[in-house]
């Protein structure tokens, strides 16, 4: 078994997430109509060595059930179009400015009250597509001229050391969505203690320079006993093979007393024995725990000192054409409960003078929203959606503008109010620390930045 020191030495540039001061404290909350687009730079107080955790809300989230209008013309239009699905205003958490949050979105009301959630309501794109697959790819590409790569994949191309930093972008899903594909670099999949998959396998053994699939496969299989010296030899292939082999060796003991020790979460997550299940509508309904294991694994990898800057997770099931009154509250509880538990759990992971909670920001998004008018039991594919960022460094509030539910397009869908690439540009600039010119190049042109960082 490769020792922890050898494992970390073999990871290449930026390998050790070691003692790093938090450099941040929770920022004050912002009023719901106090944060819009801006073109400035991020304020002080952001922590060093930041981590982005992306949560894909897969299936087209009907966010109008999460964040409903509570007053005015929007509420009138909402009640007219959703006579069955609509929630009474008295059952919502008042966020001010005519907006209320569903109480089923477990834990998010408290995080909002603490100023830790930035909501981007009405986020979308010109010429949207209502196909799940095409829309997922459009969100993933995030470019004016798509070329088969994703915005985070292109970030990896620009920011990650091509010969050594093989673990700086991780997905805990078993697939590799286009969002994570670069021209020369792609993310690595780790789905569990023995779930390591090297990039060449994820990309059907067809990866671009500097990786050679055959050489990496040979090195990956034979270099389990490679030393850290191989990674430092200057040979890119040897460095890649050695890093992969070292991580494979570490994974063999993951959670069983090996080099990456087991970790017990400091709080209960949805699905854990004793976690409260709010069976409000249906006493037979079980709370899905599909996201909890992913976030627990991310917390464990952060606690173990892996050098990842970006993690990707997914919670599926949001395609609520029917049974929405049953299924959507359950999904909200699973999503909100998992995020709230993860955020609290991070506070128990020391990180220099602070905790991992100071260093992590979560970005949640879905490929589209749903139609404003309900159908017989659910809602059909729509356009503008809801995205959010959660973290200590976030300036909480509502950014952009809530769509006008009385002014829909010809298909009865909302008109988007914020381009989704403004969100990406803000995250690239102000959280992933890219130069403005680099961000604009990665996205194809300049987009207005949002003011939550």
Image: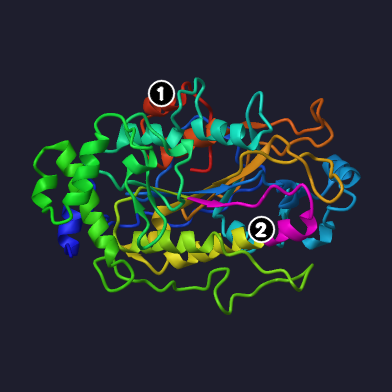
80 sits left or right of 428 in the view: right
- Give whichever of discs 2 and 1 has the lower sequence position: 2
Q: Is residue 352 visible?
A: no
Query: What label does residue 76 carry, if any?
Result: none
Q: Nearer the viewer, residue 221 or 400?
A: 221
Q: Nearer the viewer, residue 214 or 417?
A: 214
Q: Nearer the viewer, residue 172 or 100?
A: 172
Q: Give residue 350's position: percent from left, percent from top.
A: 33, 66
310 sits left or right of 118 in the view: left
Is 10 contained in the magenta span? no
Q: Residue under label 1, please give it.
A: 441
Q: Residue under label 2, please give it.
A: 331
395 sits left or right of 20 in the view: right
Q: Is residue 27 above or below residue 340?
A: above
Residue 415, by quadrant, is top right
Q: Which residues are magenta?
A: 313-331
């Amino acid at each position: 078994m490769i020792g922890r020191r050898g494992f970390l030495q073999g990871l290449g540039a930026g390998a050790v997430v070691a003692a790093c001061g938090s450099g941040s404290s929770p920022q004050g909350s912002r009023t719901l109509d106090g944060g819009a687009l801006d073109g400035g730079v991020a304020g002080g107080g952001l922590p060093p060595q930041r981590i982005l955790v992306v949560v894909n809300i897969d299936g087209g989230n009907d966010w109008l059930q999460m964040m409903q209008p509570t007053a005015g013309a929007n509420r009138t239009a909402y009640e007219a179009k959703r006579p069955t699905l609509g929630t009474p205003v008295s059952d919502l958490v008042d966020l001010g400015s005519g907006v209320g949050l569903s109480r089923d979105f477990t834990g998010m009301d408290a995080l909002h009250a603490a100023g830790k959630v930035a909501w981007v309501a009405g986020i979308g794109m010109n010429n949207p597509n209502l196909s799940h697959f095409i829309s997922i790819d459009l969100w993933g590409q995030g470019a004016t001229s798509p070329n088969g790569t994703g915005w985070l994949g292109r970030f990896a191309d620009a920011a990650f050391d091509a010969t050594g930093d093989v673990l700086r972008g991780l997905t805990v899903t078993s697939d590799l969505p286009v969002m994570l594909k670069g021209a020369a670099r792609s993310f690595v999949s780790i789905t569990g203690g023995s779930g390591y998959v090297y990039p060449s396998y994820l990309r059907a053994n067809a990866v671009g320079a500097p990786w050679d699939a055959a050489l990496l496969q040979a090195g990956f299989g034979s270099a389990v006993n490679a030393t850290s010296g191989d990674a430092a030899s200057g040979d890119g292939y040897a460095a890649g093979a050695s890093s992969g082999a070292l991580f494979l060796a570490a994974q063999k003991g993951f959670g069983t007393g090996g080099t990456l020790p087991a970790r017990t979460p400091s709080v209960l997550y949805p699905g854990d024995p004793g976690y409260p299940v709010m069976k409000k509508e249906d006493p037979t309904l079980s709370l899905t725990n599909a996201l909890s294991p992913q976030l627990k694994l991310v917390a464990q990898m952060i606690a173990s000192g892996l050098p990842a800057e970006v993690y990707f997770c997914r919670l599926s099931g949001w395609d609520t054409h029917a049974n929405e009154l049953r299924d959507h509250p359950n999904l909200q509880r699973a999503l909100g409960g998992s995020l709230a538990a993860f955020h609290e759990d991070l506070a128990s992971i020391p990180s220099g003078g602070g905790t991992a909670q100071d260093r992590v920001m979560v970005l949640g998004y879905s490929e589209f929203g749903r139609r404003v008018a309900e159908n017989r039991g659910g809602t059909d594919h729509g356009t503008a959606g809801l995205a959010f960022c959660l973290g200590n460094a976030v300036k909480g509030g509502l950014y952009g503008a809530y769509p006008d539910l009385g002014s829909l397009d010809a298909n009865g869908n909302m008109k988007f109010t914020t381009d989704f690439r403004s969100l990406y540009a803000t995250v690239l600039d102000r959280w992933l620390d890219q130069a403005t010119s680099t961000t604009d190049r990665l996205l194809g042109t300049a987009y207005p930045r949002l003011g939550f960082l």
